[in-house]
Image (tube, rainbow, N blue to C red):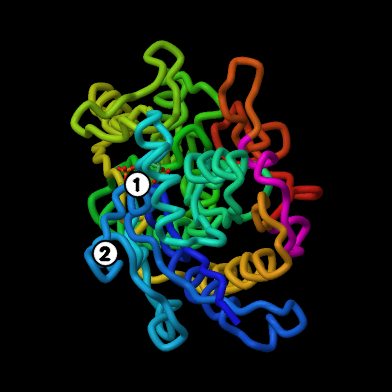
Amino acid sequence: MKKERVGILTGGGDCAGLNPAIKWATKGLLDEELCRGCGRKFEVVGIRNGWGGLLNYNPGKNGADPDNIQPLDAAMVRTWDRLGGTNLYSSRTDPLKTPDREKKTIENIEKLKLDAIIAIGGEDTQSVSHALVQRGIPVVGIPKTIDKDLMGTDYSLGFATAVEVIMQEIGRLRTTAGSHKRIFVVETMGRHAGHLSLQGGIAGGACMILIPEVVFDINRVLQIMENRKKNGARYDILVVAEGALEKKRGEFKDTDKHLDVDFGHVTLGGVAKFISNSIAKEKFAEVRSVSLSHLQRGGEPSQVDVRMGRAFGLAAAELVIQRKYGNMVNLRNNLISFVPLTDAIRKDNHGKTILNLVDVELEYDTERYIAKRQSLGMKMN
Ligand code: F6P
């Protein structure tokens, strides 16, 4: 029996949880028990460098292209669920950005004889998945982003590990903040969504958390922090999301970083520095700022991302086996399931992707700039 060939790739920013998903999607597809009854057999190839691997596939005489393609089997992926990052590498390449790229990508999918693709990624990656499905290519998505801003799922890989990192790093900062009686302003990732800062800030015990969903007023921040100092706070930790907006200044762009011409996102950063400079000017406390930056994406997966990677990887394999293409696996009300890819990448009337944002009404105290103190009825995951 001719084996069907499934390609797996990881796109966008790396994070913990990708390797467990690759491992279990591979093992699921190669599991004879799982495939019994479907009358098909599979082989699995890893596509390196995200969608870039498909675009740049350039085989030698024997069809191999180790820069872009890596055959996967159970022995190869055996230990991958212990590892952070992505062993298939990643990129922010949009393979459909120009008609030339599109032509090359579709030709390469044919050259590689791919019968299906499993794409692990966030909004950008899944928008390409969807566009390929519309062009008749069978794709299944797995949600990944530490920002947790992807619609259509209650969980996306990488989030729990990133929250864990924030908590640990705040723990480290707390000892030095305490020793020097300082305020630390800690900047987290998350783009335009505040989940990471809010949950990381809660886990780390921050006294103030600023999220992009609620525009903050620097004067109010200063007033709250000064009052805390007057009331005896020896040190304080303030967490701010990179995408937080100040009433007068608006968004903070990081002009030192240049990236992402393909999907056209602005690079955010600098808000923590702005807040710490503002506190320093008022002289009521010593202050330092830290951007946790890519530490949040690094390291080994936490138990949540190992287990969720396994569940999502296996579910994606099942969707391929059942030929349920054009879907993304998801977590909904604690159940592993799937939704049409279109649910993950819905656009608003201005053509902007709708993001999964913090439910301010339920979760955030807009006066005190902190997580709400009521939790009855709150969604946890
Ligand atoms: O989307 C994930 C994310 O980690 C964002 O939170 C952050 O703004 C961005 O990626 C950073 O991207 P890069 O790794 O390209 O610097």
Q: Nearer the viewer, residue 87 or 205?
A: 87
Tag 2: amino acid? Asp
- Horizontal arrangement in the rendering, residue 130 relative to residue 55 (left or right): right
- Let me know if residue 370 is in the magenta part: no
Q: Residue at x 51, y 41 (%)?
A: 128
Residue 91, labelled with which disc?
none
Does residue 1 appear in this view? yes
Does residue 195 appear in this view? no
Q: Nearer the viewer, residue 234 or 20?
A: 20
Residue 320 % position (x, y): 65, 65
Q: Quadrant of ligand 1?
A: top left
Residue 154 % position (x, y): 67, 52
The alpha-carbon separation of the residues under discs 2 and 1 comes to: 12 Å
Q: Say which quadrant the C terminus sits in.
A: bottom right
Q: Residue at x 49, y 32 (%)?
A: 192
Q: Which residues are magenta?
A: 331-345
Q: Badge 2: how crowded within 10 Å, few (<14), some, or many (20+)? A: some
The residue to which callout 1 is attached is: 55
Res 374 → quadrant: top right
Res 269 → quadrant: top left
**Where 100 sits versus 166, above or below?**
above
Q: Nearer the viewer, residue 222 or 74?
A: 74
**As drawn, which residue projects farthest toward the top?**
248
Q: Report if the beta carbon of the residue with label 2 is closer than 8 angstroms to ligand 1.
A: no
- Horizontal arrangement in the rendering, residue 374 relative to residue 168 (left or right): right
Q: Residue at x 42, y 80 (%)?
A: 77
Residue 298 % position (x, y): 33, 61
Q: Residue at x 39, y 35 (%)?
A: 242
Res 36 → quadrant: bottom right
Tag 1: amino acid? Leu
The residue to which callout 2 is attached is: 65
